[in-house]
Image: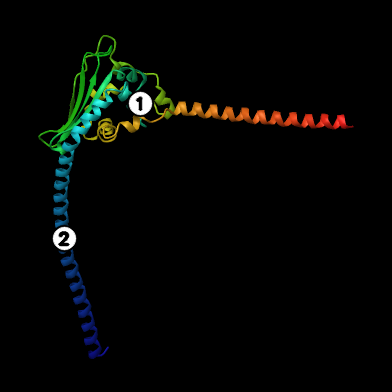
Amino acid sequence: MSASSAKVNRKENSNHDGAEETSEKEQQEAIEHIDEVQNEIDRLNEQASEEILKVEQKYNKLRQPFFQKRSELIAKIPNFWVTTFVNHPQALLGEEDEEALHYLSRVEVTEFEDIKSGYRIDFYFDENPYFENKALSKEFNVNESGDPVSKSTEIKWKAGKDLTKRSGQTPNKAGKKRQHEEPESFFTWFTDHSDAGADELGEVIKDDIWPNPLQYYLVPDMEDEEGDDDDDEEGLEDIDEGEEEEGEDDEEDGEDGEDEDD
């Protein structure tokens, strides 16, 4: 290889190395800029969360008079709350739970001033044969360490009426129609504080049932609907059979007329 060729090769390698260094430098600068932009996005997201919280707090206060008015109207409807729970698509109650909740007169969900800190669900009962309490509550909040915790009213069961100690409840009508396994007693929920941060029943009541319980109260009974469908089908079959019999009678009359003419 000539000296001039060697110089050309060294120059090309030098240019290639310089391009790689420039490319790496540009990439590093781009990463630093992305990090700066991402910090701005995070700052705006945090600001948005604070604004959303303020709006939620504002409208939570505005909703309270309407919740109160709704509770007053619901009180005029017998068995409103037990029907609502039974009609919910999740199998929330066993048969004995359903019997006990016939004495449930009012439900209230209260979100704390700082919505992030938690909420409380209150159940108010008429005099009943199961427990002494007039009200049962379960509260969800965060402790000083920021961990979710819950606490609830101790249920004062009457002798032999503790539903949490009974196993193998007979599936209720709702359980049959939904084909779910029979759940443990609804009242066990008041003693379960194992996972306050992901309490499924509490979240269902707060976020699904409480905002609009009427939608579940008005759910038609599937078994009744199936019964109506069966009646309709039987009625149609009777009509079809009647039409067939009439057709056969008309044919016989026609044949008799032909015989007479002959």
Q: Upstream in the sequence, badge 1 or badge 2?
A: 2
Q: Which mark is residue 86?
A: 1
What colour-coding does the image apply?
rainbow
Nearer to me, 140 or 26 = 140
Name the residue: 18% across, 73% down: 22
Name the residue: 23% across, 21% down: 124
Residue 140 versus residue 30 in the image, above or below: above
Report the Cα–Cα distance between label 1 and label 2: 51 Å
Nearer to me, 95 or 5 = 95
Name the residue: 25% across, 31% down: 202
Name the residue: 16% across, 44% down: 55
Can you say which quadrant of the picture contains the N terminus?
Answer: bottom left
Q: Is residue 71 left or right of residue 251?
A: left
Residue 87 versus residue 14 in the image, above or below: above
Nearer to me, 95 or 37 = 95
Q: On the image, numbered disc 2 is attached to which residue? A: 37
Q: Which mark is residue 187?
A: none
Is residue 184 visible in this depiction of the protein? no
Q: Residue furthest right?
A: 262
Q: Amino acid at mark 1?
A: Val
Q: Report helix, strand or loop for mark 2.
A: helix
Query: In x, y percent, where is residue 225?
Result: 47, 29
